[in-house]
Structure formats: C-alpha cells, structure tokens
Image (tube, rainbow, N blue to C red):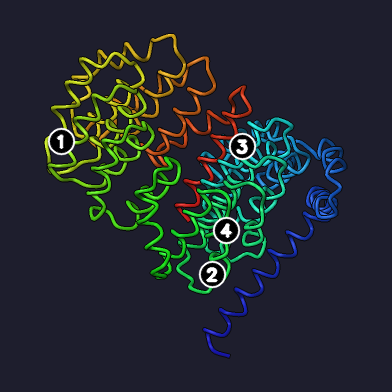
Amino acid sequence: MNLLTIRQYAIGFMCLIWLILLDGAASAGTPSGIQEMQVLYDQKEYQKVLEELPKLDSNTVGLPDVRRLKIRTLLRLGKPKEALADYDDLVRLLKTEDQSILQEVALAFVVVLTQDMREQMRGVAYTALKEWQSPHAIPFLQDGLNDGSGLVRALAAEGLAKLDGGRRSARFRQALEDQAALVKEAVLKGLGKSGDVSVIGLVEPLLQDPEVRVRVAAAEAMCRVGHKQGCALLEQSGKAPNPDERGAAIRALVDLQGAQVSPILLEASQHKQPSIRGVAAMGFGYVSTPQALAVLSRLLRDPLPPVRVAAAVSLGQLHGVDALSPLRKAIAEDPDASVRAFVIGGLLEQGELFDELSGPVTVLANTKEPAVRTALARALARASKENRAAAHSALRALFADTMPRVRIAVLKSMSKLEGVGAFPILKQGLHDEDDAVRATAGGELLHLMSMRE
C-alpha cells in the first residue's frame, strides 16, 4: 500500500469519526428535537411546532436553522409581524441578510392582503404582485382572476401579461370572457406582446366587443403580431371622435411606432377634449424633436393641471433639446402645487442641480395637502445621477409623513432611485403601522430581489 492510499484511508477514517460524533451529539438531545419539529412542520402541524420550540435548551433555540424554522412556521400561521421580529434577530445573529427568508417574509406581507375584505387593500396586494415580475407570482395572480372586484382582477391580469408563463396559461386566456372591460383589455395587451400569431383566433372576435377600449386593445394585439387589419383599425381609431377610443389608440400607436405618429400627436395636442391633449403630451415625451419641445412648452401652459403634469413629465424625458427653459418658467409661475411637484421632477431629470430647487422642494414638502406631498415623492424618483443623493435625503424626510399614501410613494420612489440600495428603508417599511405601506414595502423588496436572481 503506497503513501497516497494510506493518506486517503486516514482522511476517510477521520471523516467517519466526525460523522459518528455528530450522530452522537444528535442522539444526546437537541438535534433529535429539531428533527421532530421539522417533521411536525412538514406535516403542517404549525401550532405544535411553536409549542415544542420553548422545550429546547437555550443554545439550540438560538441556532440559525431553528430560528429559520420558527420564522417559516409563523409565516404559515399568517403572522408576518411576529416572523419579521424573529427575522431581525436572525440578521443580528448572522450579521447579514438571509435573502431566502427575507423573500418569504416580504411575500407574506403582500399575500395576507389578497384576502382582505377591503377592495383597496386587495388592490395594493395585487399591485405588488404585478410589479414582482417573477414566475413565482403566477399562482397568486391566477387566484386574483377570481376576485369579486373587476379592478383587482384587472391588476392580476396585468401581472400575468408581463410574464411569459402567465401569458401562456389557460386561466389567463380564459379571462378574455371576463365581464369587466379592464380585464379583457389587460389580457389582450398581454397576448399582443407575446408575439404569438396563434392568438389571432382568440383576439379577432373581440374587434366587435361593445366596449371601445376592448376593441382598441384587440386591434393593437393583432397589429403587434403582424396582422395588417389590426394596424389599419388602430390608425383609424387614432382619429376617432370618441375620446376614449382615440386616447387608447394613440397610446398604443406611440408604443408601436414612436416618432412616426408625430402628426397624430400634433393634431391631438389641439383637441378640445383635455384627456386627448394629455395623451398627446405623454406621447411627445418619446419624441425628442424641436417640434415636441414646442408643443410640450405650449401644453405646459394648458388651462387644466392634469395636462400640464403630463407635459412636465414628458419635458423631463426629452434629450438633445433645451427642455430646461420652459420647466424653469413653470416652477416660478404655475399656480398649482401638484404641477410644480412634477415640474421639479422634470428639472431634476434634466440635470438641474437640486440646490437650485431646494426652496420649492421644501415648500411642497411642508404643504398641508397630502396629494401634493405624494406628487413630490413620486417626482423625486426621476432625479438624474448627480441629484440622487439630495433626492434620497428629501425622500427620507418625507418617509416620516403621517399619511400612508405619502410613505407608499416614498418607498416606490426609493426603489426606483436606489435599486438594491433601497433595502434598508424597504425593510423599515415592513415595520410600518399601515397594512398598505407594509405590503408595498414587501412588493418592492420582492421586485428588487428577483432582479438580483
């Protein structure tokens, strides 16, 4: 027997002795108790798991795997708040995040609201699931298609429409028979973006749907998969007298054709219906031309605030033209505080230094109207790279707001602004006293973690 063989036998013998010692420790007490609780957990005897945990000695209770088992047990019992407290203890022990457990905790704060009696809370939950954009969300979103609210079902359909597996699911396609136009519209848009020509047979009958927005969505879906009739119908709807039909068609045409629809947008920008002017303002944000700058500068002086908001947002998106001049004028002259909030967003996106806007930001952050503070929080998400640190500080201050809707806007903006750097404030959001804020924080964490996978 050579030296190499002797060495291999020695290593094998030592490994065997180590395993025997581990087995001895297990039989001595603590691991066997853990194993018993794991069996109870696997048998879904969650309450018994919690009853057995205190019987373990203090050293065993503190083990990371035991802590994980307790957290998962609490989550299965529908107690995400208690699970979060134990997760915080686990992080302090490990001195790092446990991504797998954090994902489960975040999801629990979202899923618990899918069964809430309040439609608004269910809407928050399915909005979060929609923005998760993970295949793991598909079963939850499919359940949402059974909700009693058409708005909630539409959110679930929009979430499925973003996922390849969701678009292919039979349950998603069956939703074309839903009574709510919003649901059918979401399904049609998803089928169109699939690029699958086989959906034409499903889509074509809906060109005759009594709801105008469904007919436009059907035309858009057919156009996306290369059906010329759908494209022709969509262009026809882009000039329709019905404001709903015209607006929906223009939004689809902008997405499909970009700058080619400038003539349609120019005509729409002068329409007597404010909603059509607003659609035109939004569309010109994707057309960085001198004409777009001129039209948006005019719409930034529109009589109605929603049109001016759309113009401010689009001006922020333009490149290669002087969008700063009209925005600077608007921040000084516009009488509506919400409009000024989005003007700030446009200026920050264009690279205006935050220090030049600190005065207006402070005024809006301290206004009495929650809608204005919410608008400011949303607008700050659009800060350019050089303005992100200052925007971060402003959002942090707004997170102390007493209104949940403002805190929700802050969490969404921080997620967009910082990416995974927003983890600390999102985790803080899980501790919020408001259900909707906690679910929003959970949804944003899920989204960011899915991006890292």
Work out how far the residue at label 4 is from the one at label 3, CA to CA, in angstroms: 20 Å
Q: Which mark is residue 199?
A: 2
Residue type beneath disc 2: Val
**Vertical arrangement, residue 355 with respect to residue 279, above or below:** above
Q: Which mark is residue 135?
A: 4
Q: In the visual, does 60 lie left or right of 160?
A: right
Question: Circle 1 — which element?
Answer: helix
Of labels 3 and 1, earlier in sequence is 3
Residue type beneath disc 3: Gly
Question: Circle 2 — which element?
Answer: helix
Work out how far the residue at label 2 is from the one at label 4, CA to CA, in angstroms: 21 Å
Question: Which percent across, then down, holds residue 256?
Answer: 34, 57
Question: Circle 4 — which element?
Answer: helix
Of labels 3 and 2, earlier in sequence is 3
Tell us which disc is closer to us: 4 or 3. Answer: 3
Q: In the visual, does 29 lie left or right of 203?
A: right
Question: Which percent across, then down, holds residue 286?
Answer: 26, 47
**Vertical arrangement, residue 137 with respect to residue 62, above or below:** below
Q: Residue 392 falls in which quadrant of the image?
A: top left
**Vertical arrangement, residue 203 with respect to residue 450, above or below:** below
Q: Which residue is mark 1?
A: 294
Q: Which residue is mark 3?
A: 123
